[in-house]
Image: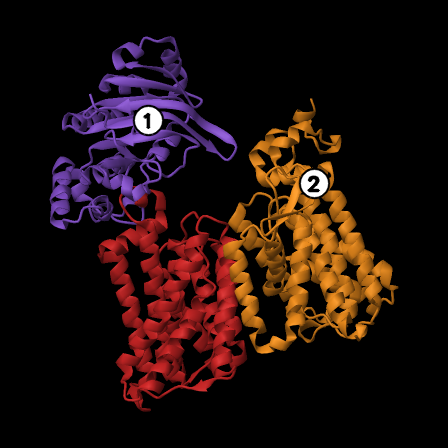
Amino acid sequence: MELFLQQLANGLVIGSTYAVVAIGFALAFTVLRVINFAHPDIFMVGMFAGLAATAQWPALGLLVTLLAGAAGAGLVGFALERMVIAPLRGRDVLMTLIGTLGVAIVLQNGMALIVGPDPVAYPSLLPRRFIDIGPVALTLRQVANFAICLLLLGLVSLYVRATSYGRATRAIAERPDVAAAFGVNVARICQITILLASMMAGLAAVSVGMLYGSASAFVGLLYGLKAFICMLVAGNRYFEGVMVVALAIGIIEALVTGYLSSSLRDAAAFFVLIGVLYFRPNGLFGSYNT
Amino acid sequence: MNFASFEPVIIFTLLNVVMALGLYITALSGQLSMATAAIAGVGGYGSAVLTVKFAWPFLPSVVLAALAAAIVGAFLALVTLKMRDFILKLTTLAFGEALAVLAFNWDYIGGANSFTGIGLKTTIWTALAATAIALYIAWRFDGSRLGLASRAVRDDPVAASAMGVPIARMRTITFALGGALVGMGGAIQAHYMLVISPHDLGFFVSLNFIIFLLFGGLQTLWGPVLGAVLLTALPEVLRFTNEYRLILYGLIIVLVVLLRPDGLLTRTPTGRAIRILGFTLVKARPVAARAAEMSAQPLPSYLLTRQAAE
Amino acid sequence: MSDLLQVTNLAVSYGSVPAVDGVSLAIEPGELRVILGANGAGKTTIIKTLFGLLRPRAGQIRFEGQIDLLGLKPHQIHRLGIAWVPEGRQLWNTLTVADNLRLGGFAEADKALVNKRIGAMFERFPRLRERQEQIAGSLSGGEQQMVAIARALVSAPRLLLMDEPSLGLAPLVVRDVFNLVREINKMGIAILMVEQNARQALKVANWAYLLETGHIVESGPADEIGGKQRVQAVFLGGHA
């Protein structure tokens, strides 16, 4: 039982990170109707932006580093939207996929050129400490990571449900023509959406870097695939669905690692994907007709 | 100049041209298949099994493997017939991945450890011959009424079927013929690389071929040729820029997608000449570039559906 | 005599297939004009082009005599005071009724004003007030039509473009819809309505056009148009 609870907790921590990255994907996919291959690498850029900030100004605390990560990622994401995604609007979705893939390759290898292809050490922004919650032992960093991601997810949820622009974002996701005909500047909302998704990813990336104590130019590959799977499994109808699925997959992975073997961990997500899509090809919570 | 040191580059380039042409034929009916690498894998694994496990001679193995690939291609066409654009691409992707997973788990053909021990049967002349065959087939198909009909289906499926073109038959033919070329390329490549692994069947490799096509242009058959040649040979030739190689590759992809979304080689609006980067290059044969011109050309009778023939 | 909206020689094609050709129409402030036509005649094409969602091959669209609508984005056209009640309602089905209405007022900066207008909508449509937190997709067809119309009215438009408001609704509800249309028009809002239900539409409109395969074949006062041969055909073949 203790193992179960421990892995449950571990899973939630990992899953919350998947959720933040997956939401970024989902926003780009449902609102802009593109597959943004470069999103996980924007995540990675955020991680290194935080790293660079603390390298320059070592006295910075956790909060400012997080913001630096958000800023760095947001900048790259915004530029991506303006320079690659927007000009390709209306064309085949494959073009944007390939275009963002090209950007992903540039970002990954560019960063590898700067910092080297191997993982580098990440500054410890929080002390190493264990926190015992009942039978479960978590590090302070894990708890912080979870809290940060949960906060971000909560903010996104609040945004899309309770703000004017957030409602407009959902309107665009469901019926873009009608939204435009009711005064919604679709291009601007798309910009804002990508900006927010990128900033979120960057902020979470700093948290993850701190959690594992390392950053790598190719970290995007790992999170990208998992996040993409989360999006496919959840369907694009409800943003919260993606969050739930991501947490679930995190938990499933942790349980598989704990009870079966760690080498099966990555396969678990694939099995979930195939299983769910077989019975519900539009995802667990359904999709709009794209 | 040591010619031999260029051999790998030349062979890879030629084989990529072959497979790109196969994808081009498939794409003629309007659907870019994301399963190219997997179908090439069918050719590769198939021919390897024949030469290694059954001691077949090289040439018949390649032929049979190409045939198998054609059948797989036709099957894919039938499976995706009723699907719309995005779902169709996703399904071909899933199909390709499924084949890759199959290869990963099938120990008879090596499973996760790859299929090794393939004999070196491919020479530069083999590759040249294959390229010549592929070019010939693509050329003939492109200019034939079959090719015309395919393009009609691509440009305007509604108008095409109104004129009696059976979309199902067209798709199946293009997927099968394209699959055969791709399979042939895969078979020959397997006998040069001497190893074939499940990773070679995956999505990223398929994407490479799509990038050749999009880069070179879909409007003439020389587009995929140019795309395959440039994007295979260029990274090799740029070896001195080793660290920057991939960054350059990524940048080229982005620039082409943004600046030349129709590819490097395009046709003039009348379809009578080929252009590159805005300069008119050569006079092309006046192959009808639009479905509207189709009505001037009679279709071969075996293509017509019953109503249109009456 | 200045037209609110003036369309001249509009031609729109889908790819190489022409949908609408040589269409000219106009509407003055406060008028209620109807475009009659069967399925596939091109009615929705015209509406979408007016909103900038489709680009015409040829023709001109002028608002209030001077403003050229061609080349404007849909959200800019809306802000001129034109609102849309789309064919088949096209509500945001995953959002609540209240959210749908709020989005109707998206273009209005004064949110308090928007809330007041929404309040007025709930006064007029008490059923919607009951259901305001319900997901729009769960409402009945008639209720959804009310939401669609209310959504458009929240933006306080000068011109309302209505695409087949009676489509798919029960006969009793259809009568209510047309009464509502007349009521809105009496408030001073010009309405350009596209309809298959010729009988009901001609009762409320002051002018009618007949659209057949992309061309306007008849145009005149509503009470005269009803007697024309072609319109009779629309009666018979137009609505089930």
Residue A237, quarter of the rendered image? bottom left
Q: Residue at x 76, y 53 (%)?
A: B134
For chain C, give the colour.
purple
Which chain does red denote in the image? A
Foreground label between 2 and 1: 1
Disc assigned to residue B147:
2
Residue at the front extreme?
Answer: B279
Q: Residue A124 appears in which quarter of the rendering?
A: bottom left
Q: Which residue is mark 1?
A: C7
**Horizontal and vertical percent position of residue A163:** 22, 57
> How many marks overall?
2
Which residue occupies 59% across, 56% down? Answer: B215
Helix, strand or loop at label 2? It is helix
Residue visible at 35% across and 39% down?
Answer: C71
Shade of chain B as shown in the rendered figure: orange
The location of residue B295, given as percent across then percent down, is: 65, 28
Quarter occupied by residue B248: bottom right
